Image (cartoon, helix red, strand yellow):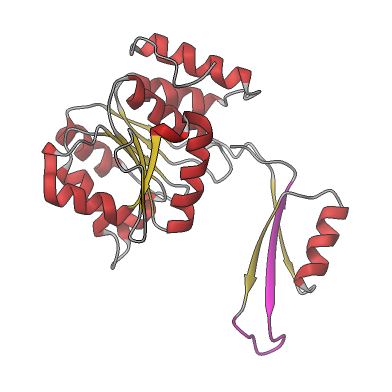
């Protein structure tokens, strides 16, 4: 089963096809992922304020699938090019390279594809130029907390203002009260806006501060069967140690 197989774009058929595809890939949807998919397949906007590691990427796949099945162009936006590039290759693997494009300030690949990965500023500029006439049917905004950034927040704000025809999926692990977004999105787009903010972290996460040299710490964690590991390696000298390192490890990950 492929997500690009033609199917009737009804909420029930989209849900059955998506969950069947997930089952074939060995993915058992968490309750909040299941709820999120239903919201998106029903044509609603969605604010997904769930913890890191809780499977927001899979919800984004459901959003792109809903748009593709309805012959709509969907955009995935992120604040940094590295994340955009990573998502581009991931979506190519799922939807096929012919269905996914990428646009950044440095490069443009398959720009006429029905699924576009781009930095937030790229979509904001499209919204400023074309407004509601833009061929944008659905927008996935990753790291939506950038909305409050003094210098770059405009790129997350403009699409919400200028693309009333689009369905929105706003994702972040660090959102507070989203009432104003819920009310404003519903008013501007004419779509109901769902909020999922009560999911618990499904993957246990351990935090550790370590002064062990980086390469030695990685070996230690792997040999202790604590991978996968996310390491923040600070390069700013500290008065007492010269360099400091912070490690976080978990026993498993989830797409």
Q: Position of residue 59 (x, y in %)?
A: 46, 32
Q: Is residue 35 magenta?
A: no
Picture quarter with the C terminus: top right
Taking 123 as reference, is 67 above or below it? above
Please tell me which residue is depicted at 23% across the width and 36% down the height of the picture.
Answer: 136
Taking 224 as reference, is 246 above or below it? below
Span of residues in magenta:
236-250
Q: Is 168 on the left-hand or right-hand side of 18?
A: left
Please tell me which residue is depicted at 47% across the width and 29% down the height of the picture.
Answer: 95
Q: Is 209 on the left-hand or right-hand side of 53?
A: right
Residue 106 or residue 232, whichever sits in front: 106
Please tell me which residue is depicted at 76% across the width and 50% down the height of the picture.
Answer: 227
Picture quarter with the N terminus: top right
Please tell me which residue is depicted at 14% across the width and 51% down the height of the picture.
Answer: 128
Viewer can see residue 171: yes
Q: Quadrant of residue 170?
A: top left
Q: Is 124 on the left-hand or right-hand side of 225?
A: left
- Residue placed furthest toward the bottom: 239
Q: Is residue 246 magenta?
A: yes
Q: How many marks?
A: 0
């Amino acid at each position: 089963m492929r997500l690009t197989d033609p199917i009737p774009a009804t909420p029930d058929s989209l849900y059955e096809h998506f969950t069947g595809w997930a089952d074939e890939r060995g993915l058992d949807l968490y309750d909040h992922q299941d709820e999120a998919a239903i919201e998106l397949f029903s044509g609603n906007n969605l604010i997904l304020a769930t913890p890191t590691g809780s499977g927001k990427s899979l919800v984004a796949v459901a959003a792109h699938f809903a748009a593709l099945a309805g012959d709509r162009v969907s955009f995935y936006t992120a604040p940094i090019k590295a994340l955009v590039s990573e998502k581009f290759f991931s979506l190519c693997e799922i939807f096929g390279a012919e269905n996914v494009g990428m646009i950044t300030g440095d490069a443009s690949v398959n720009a006429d594809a029905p699924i576009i990965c781009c930095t937030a500023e790229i979509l904001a500029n499209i919204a400023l130029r074309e407004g509601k006439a833009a061929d944008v049917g659905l927008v996935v905004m990753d790291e939506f907390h950038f909305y409050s950034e003094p210098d770059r927040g405009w790129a997350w704000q403009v699409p919400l203002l200028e693309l009333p025809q689009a369905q929105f999926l706003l994702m972040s692990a660090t959102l507070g009260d989203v009432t104003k977004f819920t009310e404003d999105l519903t008013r501007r787009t004419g779509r109901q806006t769902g909020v999922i903010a009560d999911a618990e972290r499904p993957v246990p996460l351990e935090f550790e501060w370590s002064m062990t040299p980086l390469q030695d710490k990685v070996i230690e964690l792997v040999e202790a069967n604590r991978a996968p590991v996310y390491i923040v390696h600070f390069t700013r000298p500290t008065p007492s140690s010269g360099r400091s390192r912070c490690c976080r490890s978990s026993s498993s990950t989830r797409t």
